Image (tube, grey):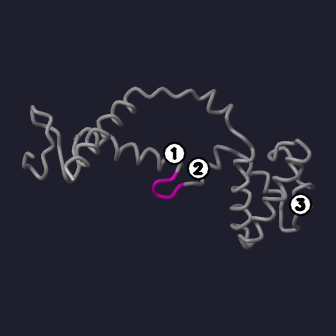
């Protein structure tokens, strides 16, 4: 068990270093976006409009298949093309093909929305600054883990 405590402590220290030196490259991140990432958002949108999920899955699948067949990115398909898959598709469906909106819709605890991520960062920073968890700290000069204040 003590080996695991040391491993977790070391991992926390490594994570602190990674986060402190992390450099993002927004241009490369944007270039990596793919309209197929939004297929699930199309399904989610239709579910919010009252279409059962088992049906939205097939509608999204047909949209993806048409995009692949025609070579037209999914977010550039015409409304009429998407509506041909199901009469319940409305003009506001085009709003689902938006990467920023897609991320912001993931607002549950631990989600990818900006407020959720900022909350997660704050929790991690507080944890890393304490350099401790509920079970251990690496504070002694010998680098040995301490468990509940007792050295091992």
Q: Tell me: 33 left or right of 139.
A: right
The first of marks 2 and 1 along the sequence is 2
Residue at coordinates 80% horizontally, 46% vertically from top-left?
A: 75
Task: For the residues labelled 3 and 1, say whether their Cβ atoms are less than 8 Å apart.
Answer: no
Task: For the residues labelled 2 and 1, say whether their Cβ atoms are less than 8 Å apart.
Answer: yes
Magenta extent: 107-111
- Few, some or many residues within 10 Å of mark 2 (<14, 14–19, 20+): some
Q: State the predominant SS element of the stretch in magenta.
A: loop
- Could you tell me which secondary element the residue under label 1 belongs to? helix
- Few, some or many residues within 10 Å of mark 1 (<14, 14–19, 20+): some
Residue 137 in the image, given as x and y percentages of width and height? 17, 43
**Mark 2 to mark 3: distance in Å?**
25 Å
- Few, some or many residues within 10 Å of mark 3 (<14, 14–19, 20+): some
Count of numbered tags: 3
Write down the residue under mark 3.
Answer: 83
Residue 121 in the image, given as x and y percentages of width and height? 40, 43
Front-most of residues 47 and 33 = 33
Residue at coordinates 51% horizontally, 45% vertically from top-left?
A: 114
In the picture, the disc for residue 136 is none
- Could you tell me which secondary element the residue under label 3 belongs to? helix
Write down the residue under mark 2.
Answer: 104
Write down the residue under mark 1.
Answer: 114
Residue 146 in the image, given as x and y percentages of width and height? 12, 46
Residue at coordinates 68% horizontally, 31% vertically from top-left?
A: 31
Q: Is residue 68 above or below residue 108?
A: above
- Could you tell me which secondary element the residue under label 2 belongs to? helix
**Mark 3 to mark 1: distance in Å?**
32 Å
Q: Is residue 95 magenta?
A: no
């Amino acid at each position: 068990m003590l080996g695991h405590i040391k491993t977790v402590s070391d991992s926390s220290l490594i994570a602190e270093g990674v986060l402190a030196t992390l450099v993002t490259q927004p241009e490369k991140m944007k270039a990596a976006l793919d309209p197929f990432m939004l297929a699930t958002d199309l399904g989610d949108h239709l579910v919010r409009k009252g279409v059962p999920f088992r049906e939205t899955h097939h509608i999204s699948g047909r949209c993806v298949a048409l995009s692949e067949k025609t070579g037209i990115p999914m977010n550039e398909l015409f409304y009429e093309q998407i509506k041909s898959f199901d009469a319940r598709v409305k003009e506001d469906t085009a709003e689902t093909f938006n990467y920023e909106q897609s991320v912001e819709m993931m607002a549950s605890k631990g989600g990818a929305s900006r407020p959720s991520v900022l909350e997660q960062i704050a929790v991690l920073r507080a944890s890393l600054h304490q350099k401790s968890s509920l079970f251990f700290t690496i504070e002694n000069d010998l680098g040995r883990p301490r468990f509940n204040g007792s050295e091992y």
